[in-house]
Amino acid sequence: MSAVQQQNEPTALYLHAELLPNIRHITLYVSLSEAIRSQDVRPEICLSDSRRGITVSLPLPYDHATDTIKLPARVNEASRLALSVAGQRAMDPRNRGHDQQEYSFRMQVDDEDDSLLSREEHMDSFVPWTATDMTSCSRLRCRHCKNIVLDSYVPCGSGAGEKDMQGWMWKDLPSGNWAEMMDFWHCHKPDPHEGHDHHANDATAEDQNATVKGYGAANQVVATAGTVLVDVATFLLTDSDCRGLKQVETNSTTTSSTEAQVELLCENCNSLVGVEDTFAKGWRLFKTSLSASKQLSEGDCKSLVWESHPLEAVVAAQLLELIERESARRFVLHCGQGDGLLIWVFNPDMRYSNSSSDHCITAQRAMKILFQDVIDVDGMLHPDRGNASALSLEELRLPPSVLSAISETLTSRNRMLPKSARVFREWKVGIMHRHDRTKNV
């Protein structure tokens, strides 16, 4: 058989496993190609001694088709017996018209497996590039053309000899609902007792303390020279600290944003890098548009390597943060141009493994996303009077290139899934990888 013929033929065997941590179940899908479907071939499934891996093979004359994946967690011993006798087809007869014949098996996670205990983690563990990941030597550049946008920090009025003496200060911004919580606290805090001077003095001291420490209701986040403020998706800096960027005024076609917005483009390649934030009196640079330098050794600012995170990991972090803050699961993703994506975060934390050639056989941490194309974003977010409006629907505005990449990723992952798992009612099913800080620990 020629190499060209091998490339054109579909994969004879395909494996996919998903872990649902809440119910501690792993579902294994085994798909066979149309070429061997008519032969009524049943795969042989073997659980490894460690109960962490699955090997599937076919009998003669298809014994060359063998595949192995690593399960997202260790299963219990009872799964071995269940797999050895589970030779019956698990698919509904209505699905026999598909190009592949599929079997599905459910296995219980071992009660003694402690790998799932890591789910109890800090709330920002899904956020790429927090302040703790950065150092005083960290720099930022355009991920497309490597144009430096945040260079080594040089204090104003300092000489060249002081260049390495002081670097950037990185600070994490509070949660998005921080201002609302502070307003609530100030509105409902206990009133001081009247007629007692010492209580009045305490109240005055408390108000002054709130102002100095920055948690007063009147305080707001403002960009500061020499400091980089970090949130889930952006870096907030002063315009004087940035370089290699140019300002361009644009107008949105959606009614949700009627004011003109100043975009920040890379001077070298014209890529969208950020936007001007007039409220914070600074510039917000998108993590999706940047690469950051990382020290090879502690204290050595000269030996640096550059890293960037997948676009989907940053968008997934935004969605997870909105889920925690707004308790919403349905979102409209758009770039201010009318159309977009309607997504439903069906499962915000799952692990899966897959035997396709462009995926790793080890378990990946991800979110299961249901999605649809939206032609009229405005009509969905702001329906006309008398029309029903969607409840618990949030919007997330993304740069056009990021929205396009997310749409392509979800479509690609939809094709990766077994055919029986690609559609749920009127929704397409996709997978979006999320940042997993536990891998770096």
Image: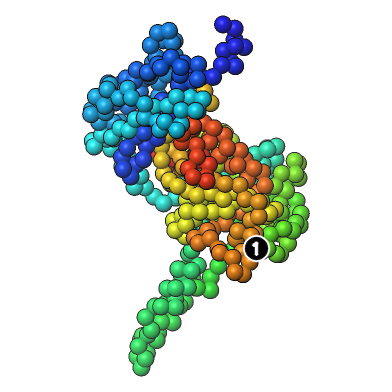
Residue picked out by circle 1: 256
Task: Tell me if residue 176 comes above or below residue 265 in the rendering.
Answer: below
Where residue 3 appears, as percent x and y from the top left, is: 59, 10
- Residue 312 found in image quarter: top right
Q: At numbered mark 1, what does the secondary structure look like: helix, strand or loop?
A: loop
Task: Tell me if residue 425 comes above or below residue 192 in the rendering.
Answer: above
Where residue 157 appears, as percent x and y from the top left, is: 68, 55
Quarter of the rendering occupied by the C terminus: top left
Q: Amino acid at mark 1?
A: Ser
296 on left or right of 274: left
Where residue 76 appears, as percent x and y from the top left, is: 25, 31
Relative to the observer, which residue lies in front, 153 or 252? 252
**Could you classify mark 1 by the number of other residues whose Cα lies within 10 Å: few (under 14), some (14-19), or many (20 or more)?**
few
Residue 354 seen in the current view: no
Where residue 409 appears, as percent x and y from the top left, is: 57, 37
Residue at the spot 64% in from the left edge and 42% down from the top edge: 404
- Residue 411 found in image quarter: top right
Task: Tell me if residue 395 comes above or below residue 291 in the rendering.
Answer: below
Quarter of the rendering occupied by the N terminus: top right
Relative to the observer, which residue lies in front, 183 or 327? 327
Residue at the spot 76% in from the left edge and 41% down from the top edge: 268
